[in-house]
Each structure stands twice: as structure tokens, then as C-alpha cells.
Image (spheres, helix red, strand yellow):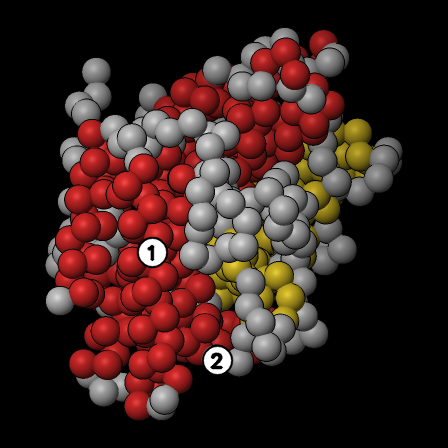
Amino acid sequence: MASPLPLPRDLTIPEPGSTTAREVLSRSLGRLLPDVAAIPRTLPSSSRGRAELEATLAAVARAAKDRAGAATILGALRSPTVGALVRSLRNELLRRATFDRERAESMLIDLVATLGLELALGGALGDELTLTRLPSRIVSLGARAAIAIPAGTRALRLASGRAVIEREGERIELDLQAIAAGEAVASPAIVTRPYHPITADIVLANVDNNPRASFGAEPGEPGNPVDLGGHAPDAWATALREALGIIAAHLPDLAREIDLYIRCFVPAGYHAETHRSASYRESIGAIYLTLHPNPMTLAEAVIHELSHNKLHALFELDPVIENDAAARFASPVRPDLRPLRGVLLAVHAFLPVARLYEKMTEARHPLSLGHYFPERFAQIRELNRAAASTVLAHARPTPIGRALLDETRRWIAHFDA
């Protein structure tokens, strides 16, 4: 039996050398393999679909018994292209009598194909896996590629290191290792390169398979379809590198958490005056955001959404606060009343943003010398004070939540000193 999660002391703003966020992420990922194993074998509507699900789950179970195979599975589940499908399907099924079977089966088809491809890429598949129920496209963050499934495809055959698309009178063979290495392929209409490097491990994703992305991350918010906003991927990558560089220079421990959690940025348009960002509880590892010419705006957004990712991982393990989800409270960052968890998300996200402003002010960074900077810093501190007051007055925390609120108190006191 796994030991209880240690009470988090620094999940909001990491102390030097902190492993808190790593522990939370690791344990949240550990939940996903049982979630995969628990997918009802009766969910597919056809006998062929049930057989393909059974074969995929058997392949996962075999791979999990081997150290290298287990590492491949963990890497796949860590990727939002797989993890978002698992969590979305699980959450849909938890609706029990009211779940949408058609939507759930669509998620399952995508999950089986995507997980199977990642296992084949990692050499952890074992026996050949043949799939006939296929999405129109499989996106692989592991291979840094998307594979289109042409109309008329009869089967996709997956084996270690390779994939074969079978159509009437045609076999399209794909070397998955060569694709992952970035080598030229003989079928560019089938294999595309929608991922653009930002850092060694983080990419700009010009493709997204998150089933929730067509909806807002919160009720009333717009969806987040992929949209480069008329700017080239290189322009996005350059702007995001600058924002990440600012964070790394002044909050190096938080920057290491970005490297740990975030696998991709998903572009959601361009707005010169306003800015919008989002993250989904199901898609841990992904940040959705609009492009903006101000590097501080992007740095704020990255920290804000990283913080949401950390709490989303914690929510996989613990409810944190046990207030009635239907109860609503005023939030300093939104005009509408919010569940208390939403107000908690706000203060948890803006405290590290305030810390960035504080450290940049101390370092006399050129950006901190303009009149806007101290005004924004004061605005963020006041926002945090208001949000924390609401949360601390009304929260009914679990022991884990109590530790998180203790950290909130310490940082509010720090900024008020």
C-alpha cells in the first residue's frame, strides 16, 4: 500500500531544492495506469472494438511488468496527448448513468490508437497490435509527429518500432524511430511535423487531441482551438523562450518545475491588447495561451498556468477543500461568482507571479524600472490579499488542503511585511 502523500509545504512557491511538486506529479501519474486498466471491456459497441481494447490493455499490462516497458508507459501517460484522453474518458465514465456513450467511445478509439503507437515507438508493445477502429489522426508527442489515417484504411498494424497502414491494394510502412529522429519520410501527406521546439523538452503544439479543448477550461469561457493568430511558429517560440528566460533568471526553482510539468504550449490566437490563457484539469502538461508582445504578460501566464497544472495534479490525489461545489464566492479576478476551489486556484497562481515581480524589483531588472511595473506588482498583491481572505475565511480543508492554506498565509504575510 502506498504511503500517504506528505503534507505539501511549498507547492505554491518552491523552496530551494524542493521535491514537493515532483512528488505530487509522480503520484498523480501513478493513478493513471489503474485508470487505464479499469476501462470497462464492455464500452466498445462492437465485438471487434472489445477485442482490440482487450488486446491493448493486455499489451499495457505486459509492458508494465518490465522496467523499460514501465518507463515507456509512464512517459506516455505523462504526455498530455495520452493523459488527457485517459482522464477525460475516466471523468466521462464517472457520470455513470448519464455518461455520453458515443463521446466516451470516441475518446476510447483515440486513446487505444495513441497509447498503442507510443508503446510501439518505445519498443514496449511485444506482440503485434492490429487496430481497425481508428481516429482520423494520431498525434504523438513522443515522436514529435502526427500521423494521418487515410480514408479507406482497413487496419493499423503496430509492432515495436514500426507501424503499417493497410488500405486496399496499399501498405504504408512507417519507421517510428526514424520519424522520432526527425528524418525525412516517404509519405509527407501521412506524417506531419506539427511540433516546434521551444526548449529541449517543451514544444509549441500546432495540433491538439484534448477532447475538452473545444470547451472552456471553466464554465463560460471560450474553447481553445489551435490558432497561431497569423504568427509563425518561430515567433511564438522566440516569445515563449524570452518569457521562460525571465522566470529562470529570477525563480530558478519554479523554472525547474516548468521543465518537470510542462510538455507543450498550445497556441490560442494573438491579441495585442488583451491576453488569455488556460489549462485543463484533464490535460496536465499543456498550457493554452494567446501570443502577446509583452514578455511579462507571457511570463505571468506561464507561471499562472503552471500553478494550475500543479493543483490539477494535486486534485487527482486529494480534494484539498471539501466545500459544497455549488456554493459561490466573489473572486478578484473574475466578474462572476466562483466555487471556492476557483478562488483557491487564483491565489495559488498569483502568489508566485508576485514573487517574480518581487525578485525582478530586487535585481533592478530593466523591465522593473518602468512605472507600470510597480503598479502591476501592487495590483497583484492586492488581488492575492482579497482572494486569500475569501479562501481562508470559508475553506473546509482536508489535511493536505490545510498545509496548502498554511503556505498561503505565510506568503500573504510576507508580501504584507
Residue 156 sits in quarter = top right
| Residue carrying label 1 | 386
Label 1 or label 2, whichever comes before in sequence order: 2
Q: Amino acid at mark 2?
A: Asn
What secondary structure is found at the residue carrying circle 1?
helix
Q: Please determine whether, in this image, residue 371 is positioned above or below residue 144.
A: below
Q: Is residue 108 left or right of residue 25?
A: right
Kindly identify the residue that appears in the image at 15 percent across and 53 percent down.
410
Label annotation for residue 141: none
Q: Quadrant of the C terminus?
A: bottom left
Q: Amino acid at mark 1?
A: Ala
Kindly identify the residue that appears in the image at 71 percent across and 36 percent down.
135
- The residue closer to the viewer here, 170 or 220, is 220
| Residue carrying label 2 | 294
Asked if residue 257 shows in the view, the reply is: yes
Q: Position of residue 44 (x, y in %)?
A: 68, 16
